């Protein structure tokens, strides 16, 4: 492999990219648009659940209990109901996602220290939101119940302990529990995978469709020189996209980057080579720009989005699907990015993911070179 011929192919591809400013602009704009849309739209946080209230007690105790719910950021009162028909109508019309019913004897039972049942109804048509909101409600109600129990113990015995167990939970690495802090790094991996494959999926196929492949075949350029030369400009574009994505995460979404910036970009470069090589391989095999772009989207976006662990925890997937995720390179890159961003881990702790990404890139690059043959079919 000669550097002169490799440089010539890369220069030709750079000129081709520059002469198509619309495609170049899209290759830069699409990642920005995707991370903007996904960054704001894709969130797993459940805040301000609209809640309708039916307070049958209308007492100081019931108001104190309700204030625990609506003083937090998890529930937001939207209406008052007078019967179950009002609650049902509000949920059916999507005015509320939850209904909170306080019984009429609430204050009397609390004063006596008796158990009192408070009902909360959730709209289960959105099971994810309902499950998370149910956990919030259980936490708020449990805290209020413990305070009542401790107050009752103190009245009976001044020497009684404040609480039997002093439970002090602490969250590491993402203390605010903001979903964007791990979604944005994962989105960088997904966007890189999709954009890189789409950029290069049209290169070889485009040469065949334009009839210029015959000219390349007649030159002394070897297969590795041609593949690497065609990858060069798209690698530069891909790294520019990575820079833009990191800057948007830092300044637009305020996602903290606690780890090494150099390590992040090195791993991004390794992953990018593999994703670009996958696009080249698809282009070589299909020899059709339309089919190449469709195949690249199916092979990159769907597995990367669904099976990388970004949105859906891999541990919750069926065992057979979990085994398939080991073949998805985005799984390792998403995990690596999260650890660099939130935990600040170095290469020593991320060695396995780094090795697997390197194997993926080497395998895809070798496949692209082996699949491309300088001959006419």
Image (tube, rainbow, N blue to C red):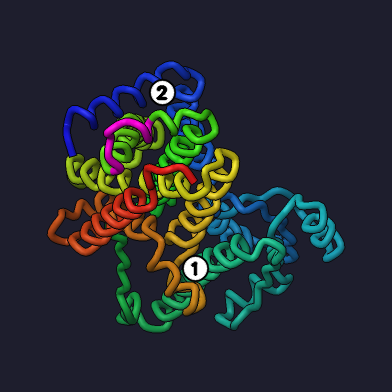
Circle 2 packing at 10 Å, graded few (<14), some (14-19), many (20+), is: some
The quadrant where residue 11 appears: top left
Q: Relative to residue 347, is residue 10 drawn left or right?
A: right
User: 230 or 338, which is in the foreground?
Assistant: 230
x and y percentages locating residue 22 in the rendered image: 51, 20
x and y percentages locating residue 70 in the rendered image: 57, 53
Q: Residue at x 21, y 60 (%)?
A: 355
- Work out how far the residue at label 1 is from the one at label 2, CA to CA, in angstroms: 56 Å
Front: mark 1 or 2:
2
User: 121 or 55, which is in the foreground?
Assistant: 121
Give residue 17's mark.
2
User: 187 or 297, which is in the foreground?
Assistant: 297
Mark 1 — residue? 139
- The extreme left residue here reads 348
Q: Quadrant of the N terminus?
A: top left
Question: Is-magenta flag for residue 325?
Answer: no
- The answer to whether residue 248 shows anywhere in this view is yes
Disc 1 on helix, strand or loop? helix
Q: Residue at x 23, y 29 (%)?
A: 5
x and y percentages locating residue 277 in the rendered image: 36, 46
Q: Residue at x 62, y 58 (%)?
A: 63
Q: Relative to residue 258, is residue 278 drawn left or right?
A: right
- The answer to whether residue 36 shows anywhere in this view is no
x and y percentages locating residue 267 in the rendered image: 24, 47
Q: Residue at x 42, y 83 (%)?
A: 156
Q: Main secondary structure of the magenta part?
A: loop
Circle 1 packing at 10 Å, graded few (<14), some (14-19), many (20+), is: few
Residue bounds of the magenta highlight: 216-223
């Amino acid at each position: 492999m000669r550097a002169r011929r490799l440089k010539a192919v890369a220069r030709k591809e750079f000129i081709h990219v520059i002469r198509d400013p619309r495609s170049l602009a899209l290759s830069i704009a699409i990642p920005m648009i995707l991370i903007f849309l996904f960054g704001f739209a894709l969130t797993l946080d459940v805040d301000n659940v609209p809640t309708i209230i039916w307070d049958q007690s209308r007492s100081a105790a019931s108001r104190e209990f309700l204030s625990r719910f609506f003083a937090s950021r998890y529930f937001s009162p939207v209406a008052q109901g007078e019967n179950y028909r009002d609650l049902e109508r509000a949920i059916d019309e999507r005015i509320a996602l939850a209904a909170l019913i306080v019984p009429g004897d609430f204050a009397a039972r609390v004063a006596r220290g008796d158990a009192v049942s408070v009902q909360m109804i959730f709209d289960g048509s959105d099971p994810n939101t309902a499950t998370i909101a149910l956990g919030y409600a259980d936490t708020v109600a449990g805290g209020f119940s413990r305070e009542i129990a401790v107050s009752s113990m103190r009245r009976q015995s001044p020497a009684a302990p404040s609480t039997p167990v002093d439970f002090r939970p602490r969250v590491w690495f993402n203390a605010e529990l903001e979903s964007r802090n791990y979604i944005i790094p994962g989105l960088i991996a997904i966007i890189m995978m999709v954009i890189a494959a789409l950029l290069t999926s049209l290169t070889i196929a485009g040469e065949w469709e334009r009839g210029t492949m015959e000219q390349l075949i007649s030159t002394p350029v070897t297969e590795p020189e041609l593949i690497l030369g065609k990858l060069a400009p798209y690698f530069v574009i891909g790294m520019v996209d990575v820079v833009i994505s990191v800057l948007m995460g830092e300044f637009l979404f305020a996602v903290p980057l606690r780890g090494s910036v150099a390590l992040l970009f090195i791993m991004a470069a390794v992953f990018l080579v593999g994703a670009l090589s996958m696009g080249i391989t698809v282009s070589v095999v299909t020899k059709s720009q339309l089919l190449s772009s469709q195949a690249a989207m199916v092979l990159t976006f769907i597995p990367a989005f669904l099976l990388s662990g970004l949105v859906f925890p891999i541990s919750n997937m069926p065992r057979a699907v979990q085994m398939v995720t080991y073949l998805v390179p985005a799984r390792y890159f998403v995990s690596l990015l999260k650890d660099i961003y939130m935990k600040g881990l170095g290469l020593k702790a991320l060695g396995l993911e780094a090795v697997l990404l390197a194997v993926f890139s080497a395998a895809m690059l070798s496949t692209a070179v082996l699949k491309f043959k300088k001959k006419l079919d």
